[in-house]
Image (tube, rainbow, N blue to C red):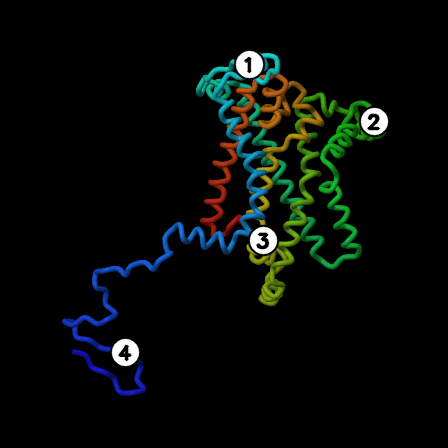
Amino acid sequence: MSVELPPGAPGVIIADPGHRTLDEPTGFEKPSPPGSGPLARIRAGWARWWYAYALITPVFVAMLVLVLYPLIQAIIFSFTNADQFNSLNVFMEDSYIWVGLENYIQILQSQEFRDVLWFTIIWTISCVFFHYVLGLGLALSLNRKVRFRAGYRILLLIPWAMPVFVSAFSWRFMFNSPYGFFADLLYSLGIESPAFLGDDTWAKFSVILVNIWLGFPFMVVALLGGLQAIDPEQIEAAEVDGANAWQRFRDVTMPGLRPVSATVILLGLIWTFNVFAVIYLITGGGPGTSTQILTTWAYTNAFDYKLYGVGTAYGVIILSILIVFSSIYRRTVRKLGEETW
């Protein structure tokens, strides 16, 4: 039994609980229309987006050949005893054998790995910290209306625009003792010049300084863009409410920079952790192994010592560390209400 409402009322039908209306489910699903299966949807998607698939196919093939295949090959090599005597020799057949986790156990138990990992952590944290602090300070300065602001921006981009090997060789010459720029400067001041690249501590300080100089322009550009995206009315409103410069920076500027900061810090950590050219071209990892980081130490094992299995195992360890760290970092940032990308 149902009651129809008068004409002009909303089209709602009130039904008795004991009677079923036409809109109630019957327990039987309607048959799918023809051509609605997975294969049909794939065909429809291909017919609609074939041009996009054709455009990304070369990129996919390049990634497959240049990234995925070498990665799989490196992972396989890391479980073998491959070296210069049993592999990659054009005059003899490969004879390396599967050794399982032996390379990883040997690496994790070695004192060299612990020393290199410790300096890698110090290197990464120090560089990224000063990258961000210097980048933020300069971005705040360039965000104001000052004379020759465009010229300052161009000058700050020079370290980033120069090829890394040019910068590295230039700094290596300046750190040279006793003929480099810094040695001459200290000599003119009556101060004895230390062996910048010959002493363990000074060598570490030197490569960290060079990498800071190379990396801070990226932070300047990224953070300057983030500052310009902040609504100036928010800062003006805080100023009207009586907030001083520090309070405006703490409560308005920094929260507005959080999305950009989360991304650039993550990228900076990954890039700095994987830096190779700066250390290899300036100190070569020396003196001894004092300035070796994981990437240069992996290269040393693979191409200097010709221990291909150990070198690729180092590469897999580096990849694993970065994946774990990136996952934890992104999860932490997401809990704070921001997203890295």
Residue at 20% x, 82% y: name it.
3
Relative to residue 328, is residue 228 drawn left or right?
right
Front in this rendered view, residue 325 or 201: 325
Identify the residue at the far front of this view.
34
- Disc nearest the viewer among 4 and 2: 4
Identify the residue at the far left of this view.
18
Q: Which secondary structure, mark 3?
A: helix
Which numbered disc covers residue 257? 3
- Disc nearest the viewer among 4 and 1: 1
Residue at 74% x, 50% y: name it.
153
Residue located beneath label 1 in the image: 93
Residue at mark 1 to residue at mark 3: CA–CA distance: 57 Å
- Disc nearest the viewer among 4 and 3: 4
- Disc nearest the viewer among 1 and 2: 1
Residue type, mark 4 in image? Val
Mark 1 in CB contact with mark 2 (< 8 angstroms)? no
Dot 1 or dot 3, earlier in sequence = 1
Dot 1 or dot 2, earlier in sequence = 1
What percent of the width, then of the height, locates residue 175?
76, 28
Above or below, 210 relative to 254: above
Q: Which secondary structure, mark 2?
A: helix
Residue at mark 4 to residue at mark 3: CA–CA distance: 52 Å
Task: Please identify the quadrant where the N terminus is shown.
Answer: bottom left
Residue type, mark 2 in image? Tyr
Residue located beneath label 4 in the image: 12
